[in-house]
């Protein structure tokens, strides 16, 4: 859509079919002439944002969701021309997920503050108090999304960066580098797309390279599903999820606290499918093989419950691979 500043978006009636035809024809022309990879639609609901500025109080349409019908018309035509073309927008709700390939995670931004700065003594049954609650919240959200939905998760974005004062804009400034590293690993490896505003990678370059390499080299981290129920950490401070694809499993576990933690990790038997032999366990974050009491080979019983140490804000990415 047009850039959402001043009266720009309010100059168009996005429900008008002739305007939709013009916009669609222009998008298809860009694909034909320039072979663009897709489109990001900025603020497609901005027409209905209340505004009392005398310079922008007039608008062509008071309808916030005219773009929903527009995208439903645009998508099949664009995909017919270039099936791999990507459609990407800011709203995170179900309506836009029906026509978009990727949506933003604005509905998840509050989770970072809730986990990293919990309210002492908070015992309310709602909200997010710690890493275990974060995993449960993400599990429930994913369960309610339409099949195939993909979320662009970002710690720092243009809309989180602009509003804070200088010196307190980036997550690394707000919470410190160790927290930013832990959040990067969590957001980038739980599935979906990771996005950051230019500059958000400063002082995190090794970790950004690592998550990109892992997503490329480990199939379940790149395109697998997230299983939050089959892996459990015996400490509320540990975020845990299993990434699974075609019988292959990698565990992502992150200590979202400033304390060293040794947690009991419990895995369900279903994670191993029909494999009943021994496994090799490699920590991809540390580039290190984990040995068990009996050596580097882990049995299914060994993996059913084991102790795992974490440094403050430490990340463990355990790839499980059968040896037999």
Image: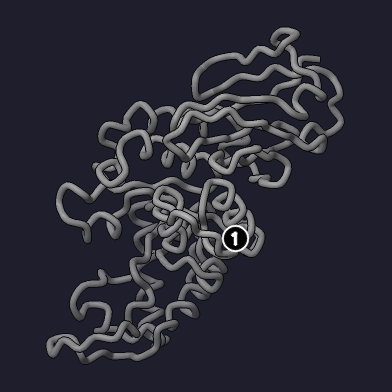
Sort mark 1 into few (<14), some (14-19) or many (20+) by Cα contacts within 10 Å. few
Q: Is residue 277 above or below residue 157?
A: above
Q: Going by the image, does 208 lie left or right of 143? A: left
What colouring method underlies this structural image? one colour
Q: Is any atom of residue 158 visible in this view?
A: yes
Q: Going by the image, does 87 lie left or right of 141? A: left
Q: Is any atom of residue 212 visible in this view?
A: no
Residue 221 position in % (x across, y down): 58, 36
Residue 12 position in % (x across, y down): 29, 83
Q: Residue at x 61, y 57 (%)?
A: 142
Residue 183 position in % (x across, y down): 42, 41
User: For this rendering, which residue is in front, 175 or 279?
Assistant: 175
Q: Secondary structure at mark 1?
A: helix
Looking at the image, the residue that sits furthest to the top is: 295
Residue 236 position in % (x across, y down): 58, 43
* Quadrant that contains the C terminus: top right
Q: Residue at x 39, y 59 (%)?
A: 39
* Quadrant that contains the N terminus: bottom left
Q: How many marks?
A: 1
Q: Badge 1 is on which residue?
A: 141
Please identify the quarter of the rendering in which residue 288 is found: top right
Q: Is residue 168 above or below residue 244?
A: below
Q: Residue at x 33, y 78 (%)?
A: 46
User: For this rendering, which residue is in front, 252 or 222?
Assistant: 252
């Amino acid at each position: 859509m047009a850039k959402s500043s001043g009266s720009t978006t309010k100059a168009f009636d996005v429900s008008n079919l002739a305007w939709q035809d013009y916009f669609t024809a222009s998008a298809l022309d860009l694909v034909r002439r320039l072979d663009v990879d897709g489109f990001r639609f900025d603020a497609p609901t901005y027409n209905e944002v209340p505004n009392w500025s005398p310079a922008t109080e007039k608008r062509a349409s008071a309808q916030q969701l005219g773009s929903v019908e527009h995208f439903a018309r645009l998508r099949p035509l664009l995909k017919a021309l270039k099936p791999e073309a990507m459609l990407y927008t800011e709203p995170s709700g179900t309506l836009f997920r029906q026509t978009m390939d990727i949506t933003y995670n604005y509905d998840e931004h509050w989770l970072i503050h809730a986990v990293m700065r919990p309210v002492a003594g908070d015992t309310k049954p709602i909200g997010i108090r710690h890493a275990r609650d974060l995993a449960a919240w993400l599990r429930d959200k994913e369960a309610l999304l339409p099949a195939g939905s993909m979320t662009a998760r970002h710690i720092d974005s243009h809309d989180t960066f602009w509003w804070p004062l200088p010196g307190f804009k980036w997550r690394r400034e707000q919470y410190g580098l160790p927290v930013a590293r832990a959040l990067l690993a969590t957001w980038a490896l739980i599935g979906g797309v990771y996005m950051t505003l230019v500059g958000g990678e400063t002082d995190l370059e090794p970790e950004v390279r690592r998550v990109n390499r892992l997503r490329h080299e480990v199939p379940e981290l790149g395109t697998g599903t997230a299983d939050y129920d089959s892996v459990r950490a015996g400490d509320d401070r540990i975020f845990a999820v299993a990434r699974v694809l075609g019988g292959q499993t990698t565990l992502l576990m992150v200590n979202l606290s400033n304390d060293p933690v040794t947690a009991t990790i419990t895995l369900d038997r279903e994670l191993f499918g029909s494999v009943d032999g021994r496994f090799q366990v490699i920590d991809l974050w540390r580039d290190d093989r984990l040995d068990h009491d009996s050596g580097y080979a882990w049995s299914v019983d060994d993996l059913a419950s084991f102790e795992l140490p974490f440094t403050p804000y430490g990340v463990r990415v355990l790839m499980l691979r059968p040896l037999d």
